[in-house]
Image (spheres, grey):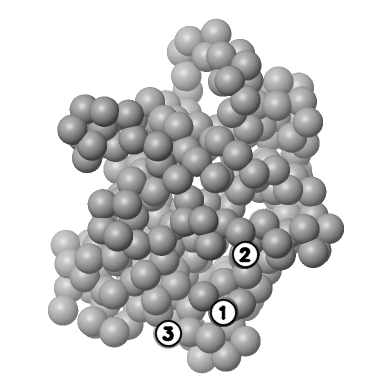
Amino acid sequence: MATPHITALADDFAETVLMPGDPLRAKMIADTYLTDVRQVNAVRNMLGFTGFYQGRRISVMGSGMGIPSLSIYAHELFSQYGVQRIVRVGSCGSLQDGVKVGDLVIAQGASTDSVVNRKRFGGFDFAALADYRLLERTVRRADESGQPVHVGNVFSADLFYEPDPAWAQRMTRMGVLAVEMEAAGLYGVAAELGRQALAVLTVSDHLISGEKLTAEQRQDDFHDMVRLTLDAMTLDH
Ligand code: HPA
């Protein structure tokens, strides 16, 4: 069995898939946190792995950058490989003074300038939401761990290099916590196919203050986020 972008066998993926943007981060998560790991995809170097975390079967696979790339992989995993839930683990840029670099942002909803969800929704504005149970469980773990966590709206931008200088101010005024490039696509695919999705993000840079994490801080925060997400996913569904 294969899809155009994944050559894995039918039961090669676990029901839960963690999805970083960078396939080498998928490898790092598999190498660091999973046992009995098998590589299950390498098409276009979009590495995918399946193993076990605390006795529970978990997969991890890269999404690439942006809604179109993520949507291809999420669609094929949900529709062809029996995947029930995908949790994006990525980074974002803060749009609020109170959301600091290094904090965690959990995307309760995802606004976007992409048209993908309007296409799915007959031209209307679709409220792209996280699965509530996944959200609740992950927020609970974050609160227990004492990590600063913000839960709310993010903006999934099609353009990393946004040309409109007024853009960020509008987002800030509307209470959008942070910008990234995939969550609205993931939530739309999950809604279309009746599956669960969540995006858990670390704040890597601040669009108002200009502050940025160092490469080392990014790595540490990424690990904290991955551990927290894995712990949340291995609580009972
Ligand atoms: N824009 C889009 N995605 C991002 C950003 C950003 O500024 N920072 C981290 N991910």
Identify the mark at residue 236; answer none if there is no mark: 1
Of the numbered discs 3 and 1, the one sitting upstream in the chain is: 3
Q: Which amino acid does label 3 sit on?
A: Arg
Where residue 143 appears, x then y in whole percent?
A: 77, 58
Amino acid tagged 1: Asp
| Location of residue 197 (image quadrant) | bottom left
Residue 31 visible in this rendered orientation of the protein:
no
At numbered mark 3, what does the secondary structure look like: helix, strand or loop?
strand
Q: In the rendering, at what x and y percent does residue 25 appear?
A: 54, 61
Q: Can residue 4 be seen in this view?
A: yes
Q: Seen in the image, is 47 located left or right of residue 104?
A: left
| Direction right: furthest residue | 146
Position of 95 with respect to 48 (left or right) is right
Tell me the residue that label 2 is attached to: 137
Q: Residue 50 carries which label?
A: none
Q: How many other residues sit within 10 Å of disc 3, few (<14), some (14-19) or many (≥20)?
A: some
Query: Residue 69: x, y in percent?
Result: 32, 47
Q: How far apart are marks 3 and 1 (CA)?
A: 24 Å
**Label 2 CB less than 8 angstroms from ligand 1:** no
Check disc 2 and give the amino acid type. Answer: Arg
The image's mark for residue 38 is 3
- Marks 2 and 1 sit apart, C-alpha to C-alpha, by 9 Å
| Secondary structure at numbered mark 2 | helix
Looking at the rendered image, the quarter that the N terminus falls into is bottom left
Front one among 134 and 220: 134
The residue at 70%/43% (across/down) is 150
Q: Residue at x 48, y 78 (%)?
A: 58
The Cα atoms of the two marked residues, 3 and 2, are separated by 27 Å
* Residue at the image point whose x is 52% and y is 51% from the top: 199
For mark 2, does the 10 Å Cα neighbourhood hold few (<14), some (14 to 19), or many (20 or more) residues?
some
Q: Which residue is drawn at 57% across and 90% down?
A: 55
In terms of sequence position, does the residue under pointer 2 or pointer 1 come before the other? 2
